[in-house]
Image (cartoon, rainbow, N blue to C red):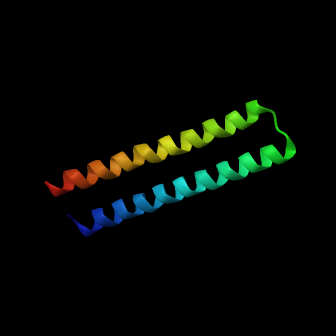
């Protein structure tokens, strides 16, 4: 595997880790703030859907990283 390809895969892995961590932090904050100010449940559900979208995005990128590593090995 080339060094350049290793760098690209590592950069994508860091990006995915930041997306996952950021999504969870923002989701927890939204849940806490929503409960503290008494937001209706439909807004809380919207925050849940946004967090789910972020995690699906991360999952797709993880699969792309896995396929890139697998294709480069053989």
In the displayed structure image, the side of residue 33 where residue 5 appears, left or right: left
Which residue lies at the image location 65% right of the left edge and 48% below the top edge?
27
Question: Picture coordinates of residue 23 (x, y %)?
Answer: 59, 51
Residue 3 figure quarter:
bottom left
In the displayed orientation, state which residue is furthest to the left: 74
Closest to the observer, 50 or 31:
31
Which residue lies at the image location 27% right of the left edge and 48% below the top edge?
67
In the displayed structure image, the side of residue 36 where residue 8 appears, left or right: left
Question: Picture coordinates of residue 34 (x, y %)?
Answer: 79, 44
Question: Picture coordinates of residue 56 (x, y %)?
Answer: 48, 41
Which residue lies at the image location 20% right of the left edge and 50% below the top edge?
71
In the displayed orientation, state which residue is furthest to the top: 42
In the displayed orientation, state which residue is furthest to the right: 37
**Quarter of the rendering occupied by the N terminus:** bottom left
Which residue lies at the image location 68% right of the left edge and 34% below the top edge?
45
**Quarter of the rendering occupied by the C terminus:** bottom left
In this rendering, the count of numbered labels is 0
Question: Picture coordinates of residue 32 (x, y %)?
Answer: 75, 50
Closest to the observer, 62 or 34:
34
In the displayed orientation, state which residue is furthest to the bottom: 3
């Amino acid at each position: 595997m080339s060094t350049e390809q290793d760098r690209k895969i590592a950069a994508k892995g860091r990006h995915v880790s930041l997306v996952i961590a950021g999504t969870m932090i923002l989701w927890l904050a939204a849940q806490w703030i929503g409960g503290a100010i008494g937001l209706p449940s439909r807004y809380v559900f919207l925050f849940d859907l946004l967090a789910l979208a972020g995690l699906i995005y991360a999952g797709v990128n993880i699969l792309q990283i896995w396929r890139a590593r697998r294709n480069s090995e053989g």
